[in-house]
Image (cartoon, rainbow, N blue to C red):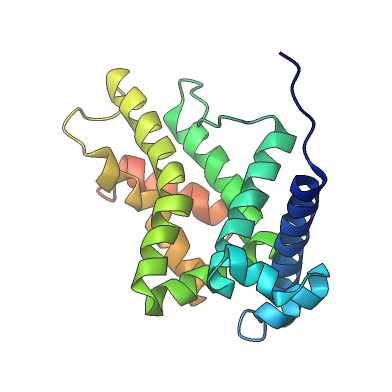
Amino acid sequence: MVKKPASDSTRRSERSRRAIYDAALALVVEVGYPKTTIEGIAARAGVGKQTIYRWWSSKADVLLEAFLDLFAQASREAGAEPYVIPDTGDLAADIKAVLRATVDQLKDPRYAAPSRALAAEGLVDEELGRRCAAMLMEPSLQLYVDRLRAAQRAGEVRPDIDPRIALEFFISPLAQRWLQHTGPISYEYTDTLVDYALHGLAPR
């Protein structure tokens, strides 16, 4: 069966959607989330604001979908789809490598600005916060769970450890420091988090 080509309206819709994604992400970086508006996104994208309201109910919804698309594009370009945390047999090295990549993203305005905007908005809009957690955070957290379970099977981690709690030793301090500006984030910092988490604080 010959596959029918996409209609002109479908292609126009996709171009418009892509332009809206790009506009939302660019405006959040350039003017900040509070000054980003549906009207501004529409003008930047070259579409009517009713086009945006036909697909999304708020600028937060636009930004969340645009951010998810940005991550999907980055994964495709990196050839990392579906992505997993590498298992080299060295748990510390594997976690450190992933956290270093996370530091790079958190320092990149393309990712940092929408991340902060969605995190802040999610604090006052509980429904949005839950969606952000489910759509943005949960897939990444599951990767840590899978890697820690593999480490349990290999005898690198105690079998009674709950991976969902253990991963917070890596993720939560980094997120708090980044979101609340309590200190700089760096490779050295995340490497130290891993060492402290895996080896504990007691004398060895």
Residue at 37% x, 30% y: name it: 146
Residue at 60% x, 71% y: name it: 53
Q: Nearer the viewer, residue 16 or 21?
A: 16
x, y percent for residue 118: 52, 69
Is 156 drawn above or below residue 15 in the view shown? above
Residue 108 appearing in the image: no
Is 117 drawn above or below residue 153 in the view shown? below
Q: Residue furthest bottom?
A: 35
Quadrant housing the N terminus: top right
- Compared across the picture, whether 118 is left or right of 195 comes to right
Q: Nearer the viewer, residue 171 or 200?
A: 171
Q: Nearer the viewer, residue 203 or 33?
A: 33
Residue at 28% x, 25% y: name it: 152
x, y percent for residue 27: 74, 74
Quadrant housing the C terminus: top left
Q: Where is residue 199, by image quadrant?
A: top left
x, y percent for residue 55: 59, 62
x, y percent for residue 95: 48, 38
- Compared across the picture, whether 159 is left or right of 148 comes to left
Q: Where is residue 184, by image quadrant?
A: bottom right
Q: Where is residue 173, by image quadrant?
A: bottom left
How many discs mark residues in the rendered view?
A: 0
Q: Residue furthest top?
A: 1
